[in-house]
Amino acid sequence: MSVVLVYTLGATALQKFNPGSGRMELQLSPGELLASAAVPQGIEARIDRAFPFRSGAELTYEVLLEVAAVISASCRQDPTVNGCVLLCGTDTLEEAAFALQLMLGTALRRTHHALIVTGAMLPADQPSSDGPRNLRDAITVAAHPATATLPGGVLVVMNDSIHLASYVCKADSQLVGAFRSHPGPIGQLRGGAPVYYFSPPPAVGPNWLADEAFGQLAAAALRMRVAVWTLGVSGFLPDSLLHELDGLVLAGSGTGSLPAALVEQLAPAWTSRLPIVICSRCPVGQNHDDCHYRGSRHKYEGRGFILDRGYTNLNPLQARTLLVLRLSAFGTA
């Protein structure tokens, strides 16, 4: 018998429309959702902790730190546990999965567990609600012995697909198949069981950025002011904003290209005072290309901007999460 622990933060899967208030409200308990998920025989799935309900828009790093601590303790203390599942809102599911990957990745690899993050795109009162099926699939993946061999420790299971937390993104705001990853899911649910298409990739790129120090932070330490700035009409950032920041992520065009005027404003006046990370605003790709655009890396690193140190392949949301955690844990990027 495989044992899977389920944790809930609240999600669309637990909501229904209330005609009286005219709003979507929490009307389904985690236990009721689990009972409707038709968990396969041979798997014991139980609700280990139902955290206070919150929508994805209300999710914070402090909440994720609490979730990470509880899951880590359960995996260490209960030798019968095969894996864990977290049900959360899909609005910030990709950020939650990536942050938990950074906080828990090392510990999960050591204890040979996997954390599966899932949710629902459709509320519980829709005839085609995907909540029960996604929960069942996530539990099935968490219980499968091959899952724990994958690097990183955190996966996302949505709409029959299994994604690495390091590469998944919410590519559509409404569709059931909203979650995608490049170059594709590492596996899918077929015939009620996970099928993995690739051998475990090496623990490189975003998979090796996890650090146990992230999971041991005090909640108050996470209050770092890190902004993401994408380039638009103006090439200048207000100095009044920069004075209030602990760090900055610049989402440049293409391979992280910045207007010359912005570079002159920030370097060295601000690159010497706070960490400024450059990444590409594209969903996939690196923040420089010295193969074709030779010198594209040095022209920014030579002025004090940060392109390496693990940020090379990250998108703006991921780069901000990593920068917040590193500043909180180490005081440096």
Image (spheres, rainbow, N blue to C red):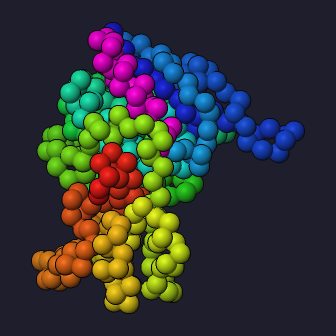
Membership of 77 in magenta stretch:
yes
Which quarter of the figure has residue 256? Answer: bottom left
Residue at 71% x, 29% y: name it: 27
Q: Is 104 above or below relative to 311?
A: above
Which quarter of the figure has residue 212? Answer: top left
> Residue 301: image x %, image y %?
21, 75
User: Which contiguous range is marked in magenta?
Assistant: 61-86
Residue at 39% x, 53% y: name it: 324
215 relative position to 291: left or right: right
Q: Is 183 above or below relative to 222?
A: below
> Residue 204: image x %, image y %?
16, 49
Which part of the image, by quadrant, shows the N terminus? top left
Looking at this view, is 297 or 189 the one in front? 297
From this viewpoint, is residue 318 visible? no
From this viewpoint, is residue 224 visible? yes
Residue at 47% x, 58% y: name it: 225
